[in-house]
Image (tube, rainbow, N blue to C red):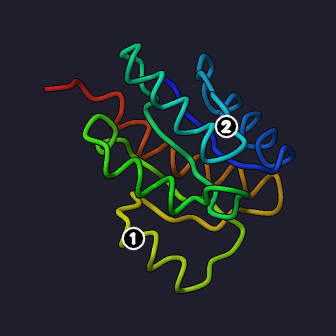
Amino acid sequence: MQVLLVDDNPGDVLLMQETFEELHVGVDVLTASDGAEALATLDRGVTSGRLPDLVVLDLNMPGMNGIEVLQTVRANEDLRHLPVIIMTSTAAEEEVVEAYRSYASSFVTKPQRPGEMTEALRSLDAFWLRIAQLPKT
């Protein structure tokens, strides 16, 4: 099981990494601190045949923002099938609408406390990571 976390806040990344590792023994957590790094990581995954099972993407990043990353992923035939969860600290209605218009798989407001992060990632796990484990047809 592999998850790509894309967030420019090192504290949020560390919290999410620790929470995923708590929930899953053996989960491989990749990180990218901006959109360009995320896309480079995904391109390497296409080349190697080892794409992540889930992408957790922040919206507010310097350079390429999360919506631009999402739109690039959805425009790429090799990547468009990936579940991309937007997890961001803001939840303005226009951001939610834009994320879903760009085919986000889900939109989650980033919890501010560790216990809430565990609960948010547990709910993602219960749905998206379980789907990733289903046999491919």
Front-most of residues 77 and 132: 77
Residue at the far bottom in the pictured view: 93
- Which is more N-terminal, label 1 or label 2? 2
Q: In this rendering, would 44 be left or right of 37?
A: left
**Residue 1 rendering spot, x and y as whole percentages:** 48, 23
Which of label 2 and label 1 is nearer to you?
2
Q: Report the amino acid beneath label 2.
A: Ala
Residue that numbered label 1 is attached to: 100
Give residue 36's mark: none
Q: Residue 113 lies in what quarter of the image?
A: bottom right
Judged from the image, the secondary structure of the residue bearing numbered disc 1 is: helix
Front-most of residues 22 and 83: 83
Front-most of residues 29 and 7: 7
Q: In this rendering, would 65 be left or right of 118?
A: left
Q: Report the amino acid beneath label 1.
A: Tyr
**Residue 117 rendering spot, x and y as whole percentages:** 72, 53
Identified at 46% across, 69% down, the residue is 99
Q: Which quadrant is home to the C terminus?
A: top left
Identified at 65% across, 53% down, the residue is 119
Q: Residue 136 lies in what quarter of the image?
A: top left
Graded by Cα atoms within 10 Å as few (under 14), some (14 to 19) or many (20 or more), the crowding at tag 2 reads some
In the image, residue 137 sits, relative to residue 34, either above or below, namely above
Identified at 76% across, 49% down, the residue is 8
Residue that numbered label 2 is attached to: 32
Residue at the far right in the pictured view: 11
**Residue 65 rendering spot, x and y as whole percentages:** 61, 60
**How far apart are the two marked residues, 2 and 1, measured between alpha carbons?**
22 Å
Q: Residue 78 lies in what quarter of the image?
A: top left
Judged from the image, the secondary structure of the residue bearing numbered disc 2 is: strand
Residue at the far top in the pictured view: 48
**Residue 21 rendering spot, x and y as whole percentages:** 69, 28
